[in-house]
Amino acid sequence: MASVAVRKKEATRDLDHCDIPYYVSEFVEREVGNDYDSLRNLDNLIDKLSENKKQLEEQVLTVSSEVPKRIQNALKNAEDSKKSLSRLLEEETLLSDLISAHLLKAQPWMEDLGVLISQVEEIERHLAYLKWISRIEELSDSIQQYLMTNNVPEAASTLAFMAELDIKLQESSCSHLLEFVRSTVKFWHKILKDKLTSDFEEVLTQLRWPFVGPPQSQAFGLAAPANTPDVYSNLEMLFCQLLKLQTSDELLTKPKQLPEKYSLPPSPPIVLPIQIMLNPLQKRFKYHFTGNKQTNVLNKPEWYLTQVLMWIGNHAKFLDDKIQPILDKVGSSLNAGLEFSRALVMLILEKLAADIPCLLYDDALFCHLVDEVLLFERELYSVHGYLSSFPSCMHILSEESCFQRWLTVEKKFALQKMDSMLSSEAAWISQYKDITDVDEMKVPDCAETFMTLLLVITDRYKNLPTASRKLQFLGLQKELVDDFRIRLTQVMKEETRASLGFRYCAILNAVNYIATVLADWADNVFFLQLQQAELEVRAESDAVSQLQLGHLASMESSVFDEMITLLERLKHDMLTRQVDHVFREVKDAAKLYKKERWLSLPSQAEQAVMSLSSTACPMLQTLRDRLLQLEQQLCHSLFKIFWQMLAEKVDLYIYQEIIMANHFNEGGAAQLQFDMSRNLFPLFSHYCKRPENYFKHIKEACIILNLNVGSALLLKDVLQSASENETLNPSQPSATAALNELGVYKLGQKDVEILLNLRANWPNTGK
């Protein structure tokens, strides 16, 4: 075993080779080890190893015999595959030769057959061409026969079918065939349209169309003729027949369109029967509002705008009651009233496009035109249900030169309005000063008038067709807000010396009101949509960083954020100036109170009744007067900020300049607490339930100064022990818990120790 152990020591493993000595050493160590008794099992171990050796030899012999057989089979398969491939190649070559020979032999046949196929295809084309001609002639003959028998409905249906064939042939290159079909459609369309139009106009005349008077005076509604049912039956029949001519009419009639610079939305042509119904009104419009007529004047756009609104209103009932059912019956999705309105609005658009260049640089005329157009649009949408997807006057006003002029005029008149409102005698007086419930914001007249001006501008541009135009108007509104802020700042600087005066407070109320209204507008759906549009524009132009885009997209900001920030900054500066002014007055009034002999005042037991220190009266009176004055002059939200800022300053001042600068006997501490808790704090009790919470330094200092002697000594020991143990044993509870038990949360440990040292009523301990 010793020799084995020695060999084990000497046997080190060679990782790069099959190290038999190492494995033998490991095996012996594992099976025998240091147990000499295990040597008795050597026979079994040798038998076991012999058996393993035999099995391994058998496996080697088996593998040695099988591998050659597999290799032999694989070689045989490869030979067979090679022979098959050679055979297939020979067959392919033979077949290729046969195909080439066949193609060579069949070449003449192919050439002859190609000529025949070309001839057949040409004949088929001729035949198809003749069939189309024959088909059109048959339809033409049918229309003629129907007209000869006065069967107009069938003639109209046949013409509609012919028009559909015309549409199908549009992709054909047979120009003569297309010309033949189109001329045939045009021929019959004119005949049928003229006949039906004549009959339709006759029926309309019987109904006394158009209705130029108010609805209550219309003949068909009040004094209808005896044959009214027959008239309405003819109306329906002719209307339906004219509808059948719509397809051919659209093929032959090119609609009148305004120049592309107006960017009108695409809209289908007005249906033929409604076009015919509109003819007399269009003639009246052109007669009165074009040429040299007295009714065609640039300074009276309201004449033609009002006339069109009257026509729409006068005919609305007839269109809804008589024409709409016909459209519904034939399965049309059109709305008769809207189609009628759309056609009349197109007359307005043409008139505006012609008139605007003539008055573009006359501010008074242009501004009057815009005002009248906006009134027209408002009534058109609200009263008559006109759709925003239709062409409207706003598309004309959105044309580049007209729109820029509109922006310029809008800004000019807004600035003039701002000048007049700020120079008014009532500019800084609230309209509702005598109505308490309404006058919570104490808004001066100039601020309310200015925000009304902005609201009116919003109403004027909110129906513009594109977001880019709306954003330009939004930019104008921002400019006006900034201009008004600058004007308020200028007036404020003139009033700086009287920062508690009426006008200064009115300016502050105005700033607060504008910022509040803009913040409310930021949540309005219209401005949220503009914010999204602005985000898209900025993203396309890469004008802002990804961080800013993310901030905008999160809707945490608004379109007025920059303006609101500037207004809030101005508001804070003005409030700070007011607080500082009042605080200076309070400090001046507190000079005697600072010099009070706190160390020699009589104790509470020596006084029959506690009373306010006479030296505190000027300070408290100043505070009371200024609080009452500003409560009346500032709105509630501003006054709340004011008194809280003032309370914070007074709290620190009394704590630092009076309490920490003096020593107190028992009577002095009691007097200080009485002055503060019974006189100072109640001044602010009108504005909150617990005013002492805004004077935490004073309140907690009074608690410390008025502790009885035993509690004060105990607290002093606790604080001293806490200071010593803080370095020796940091895990020990601090003095904070002890202070909290007394109601002291604001003051730190060092401050309390100083306050305790300001007490003069310590017992004589003999130390």
Image: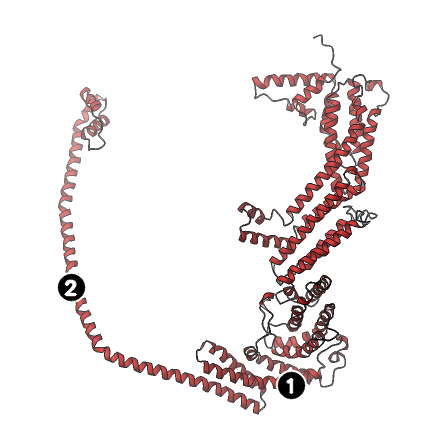
At 70% from the left and 24% from the top, the residue drawn is: 742
Residue 533, numbered circle: none
Quadrant of the rendered structure where residue 329 is? bottom right
Q: Nearer the viewer, residue 162 or 459?
A: 459
State the separation of the CA atoms marked 2 and 1: 90 Å
Report x, y in % for residue 379.
71, 65
Q: Which residue is mark 1?
A: 199
Which quarter of the figure is the C terminus placed in?
Answer: top right
At 56% from the left and 52% from the top, the residue drawn is: 538
Q: Which residue is mark 2?
A: 87
Q: How many other residues sit within 10 Å of disc 2, few (<14), some (14-19) or many (≥20)?
A: few
Report x, y in % for residue 440.
77, 46
Report x, y in % for residue 121.
35, 81
Q: Amino acid at mark 1?
A: Asp
Viewed as shown, does residue 171 lie left or right of 96?
A: right
Q: How many other residues sit within 10 Å of disc 1, few (<14), some (14-19) or many (≥20)?
A: some
